[in-house]
Image (cartoon, grey):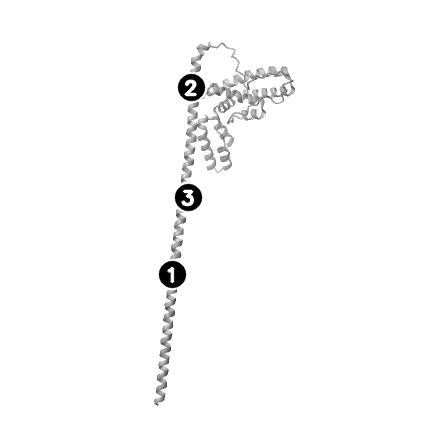
Amino acid sequence: MDVDEVIDALYALPPARFTAARDEAAADAKRAGDPAAAKRIAGLRRPTIAAWTSNTLVRAKPAEVEQFRQLGQALRAAHRSLDGEQLRDLSHQQHVVIGALAREALRLADEAGNPVSETVLREVEQILYAALADPAAAEAWASGRLAKAPALPTEFPGVDADAVPPVLPASPVPPVPPEPTARPRAAERQPDRRVEAARAAAQEAEWAATAREDDLRQAEEARQRAVEQAAAAEAEVDRAQAARELGYAAVAEAEERHREAVRAAAEARKAAAAAGRRLRALTAGEAGEETGGAEDD
C-alpha cells in the first residue's frame, strides 16, 4: 500500500465522505499487516469545507500554485528589504491573484457537484493570504492535504511599519476587484445570487448532516464495543463466581471426607481396643485353665 497515494485520494473526497473512507482505508492497512500505515491513516483529520475547496484548487491548478508560491516569496523578500515601490506593485498582484484563485476554487467546487457559499469564499481567501505570508503555511497549502485553515498572520515577516508606507488593506483579505468584462447590473444579478446562495447553503447543510451521521455512527460503534466489553466482563465474572462456588464445594467435600476419615479412624481405634481386651481376656482364661489342670495332676 502506498500511504501517500491513499492520503491524497482521501483529501480529494468531499468532507462528508471523508470519515467513512478514512476508517475503511485504515482497516485495509491493518488487514494488510501494516500497523504503522493504519495508525497514520486513522489519525487523519476530516477537512473543513474551505480546506477541501482549497485542496481542490491545488490539485487542479499545479502551475498556478507554483506561481502563487513564487509571488509569496517575492512579497516576503520585499518586506525584508523594505522596498516600498516593489511592495506596492506586489501587493496589487496579491489582491488580484487571491481574488482570481478563490473564485476559481469556488468554480471547481461547483463543477465537482459541491457548490459552496460566499462565506467559504472568504475562508479560501484567508487560506491564500496565509500561504503568501508564511512559508510553512504555503507548504501545507501546496500539499493539497489541508484539514483546516492555517493561522492567519497579522502582517508579513520583517515589516517595519514606520519605514514602509502601508500597502496592505486593513482586513487580512482584500475584496476581490471587479473583473474587466462587463457584468449584469446588481438588480439583474440578484436572483442568480440568491439561487446560488440557496444551493450552497443546502449543500453545506447536507454536508453537515452527513458529518453528524458519521459522528453518530462512530458513537454507536463505540457504544456497541462498550456493550460487548461489558458482556465479556460479566461473563468473566460469572466464570469466576462459578469457579469460586466449585472451589467452595470441593473444600466442603474434602472437609466431609476428612470428618468421615476421623470418624473411621476413631471407630477403628475403638475396635482395636475392644479386640485387644478380648484377646487379653482369652489369653488370661487359657492361662488359668492350664494352671488348674496342672494342679489336678
Q: Earlier in the sequence, mark 3 or mark 1?
A: 3
Task: State the residue at coordinates (56%, 20%).
Answer: 68
Element type where label 3 sits in the image? helix
The disc labelled 2 sits on which kind of residue? Arg
> For residue 91, which quarter of the picture?
top right
Q: Mark 3 or mark 2, which has the lower sequence index?
A: 2
Q: Which mark is residue 233?
A: 3
Residue 98 higher or lower than 32, as above or below: above
Name the residue that disc number 1 marks. Answer: 257
Q: Which residue is mark 2?
A: 199
Q: Residues within 10 Å of mark 2 (few under 14, many from 20)?
A: some
Q: CA distance from mark 3 to mark 2?
A: 51 Å
Query: Residue 167: percent from the left, percent from the top?
Result: 60, 16
Tell me whether circle 3 and circle 1 mark residues in contact (CB < 8 Å).
Answer: no
* Rendered location of residue 195, percent (x, y): 42, 16
Mark 2: secondary structure: helix
Kindly report which numbered mark, 2 or 1, lies closer to the viewer in this rendering.
1
C-alpha separation, residue under disc 3 versus residue under disc 1: 36 Å
Name the residue at 58% across, 25% down: 135
Q: Position of residue 169 (x, y in %)?
A: 57, 16
- Give amino acid for label 3: Ala
